[in-house]
Amino acid sequence: LAWSAPSIAQGKLQHVVPLALTLVLLNPALLIVDHIHFQYNGMLLGVLLLSAAEIEAGSIYRGAFLFCILVNAKHIFMYVAPVYFVYLLRAHCGCSFGCGHLGVELRIGRLLVLGSLVVGTFAVVWIPILYTGQVLQAFQRLFPFGRGLTHAYWAPNIWALYNTLD
């Protein structure tokens, strides 16, 4: 693709782009590694990008819904939640922070709709878990402190000191 980029920009070899994209996306090795070993990280990263694109395009609630689904599908994306929270609170709900004061343009209606969407999405996902009494098991799987914090996908740079003691 890098070789053909200048030609594509000039309108030549436009047929290469769909072919190259198809070959990359349908690469069996990539599918096996990504969707078996890494538990659908590629697809979920696509959902994250789709969520951000929806918010950028003005579909705030659709983007927020996609992000809620994403966090419930794989909790490792929770590290992005503070960014979404601050951005949506400032850009959509009108709350501003600065100089030791809270902005007075808070749009309560938008905040309530957005909050209801988030709470409702989490409720739909978690009510069956609550109903079946599997909350403790769900949290033990989400946060495997019993196996050590460096197990599997925990970032080793954050837990380097803990790893030494563990």
Image (cartoon, rainbow, N blue to C red):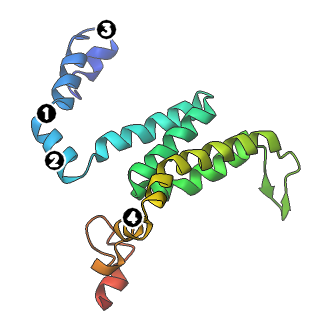
- Judge left or right: residue 102 versus residue 78: right
Q: Are marks 2 and 3 in contact (CB under 8 Å)?
A: no
Amino acid tagged 1: Asn
Mark 2–mark 4 distance (CA, rounded to whole Å)? 25 Å
Tell me the tag on residue 27: 1
- Judge left or right: residue 127 versus residue 149: right
Q: Is residue 60 above or below residue 144?
A: above
Q: Which residue is mark 2?
A: 33
Of callouts 3 and 4, the N-terminal one = 3
- The x, y position of residue 37, in whole percent, is 18, 53
Q: Which residue is mark 3?
A: 11
Of callouts 1 and 2, the N-terminal one = 1
Mark 4–mark 1 distance (CA, rounded to whole Å)? 33 Å
- Judge left or right: residue 71 versus residue 39: right
The residue located at (65%, 47%) in the rendering is 87
Q: Quadrant of the N terminus?
A: top left
Mark 3–mark 1 distance (CA, rounded to whole Å)? 26 Å
Of callouts 2 and 4, the N-terminal one = 2
The residue located at (20%, 26%) in the rendering is 3
Mark 3–mark 4 distance (CA, rounded to whole Å)? 52 Å
- The x, y position of residue 137, in whole percent, is 37, 68
| Secondary element type, mark 2 | helix
The residue lying toward the viewer, choosing from 76 and 52, is: 76
Q: Which residue is mark 4?
A: 138
The residue located at (80%, 58%) in the rendering is 98
The residue lying toward the viewer, choosing from 6 and 23, is: 23
| Secondary element type, mark 3 | loop
Q: Quadrant of residue 12?
A: top left
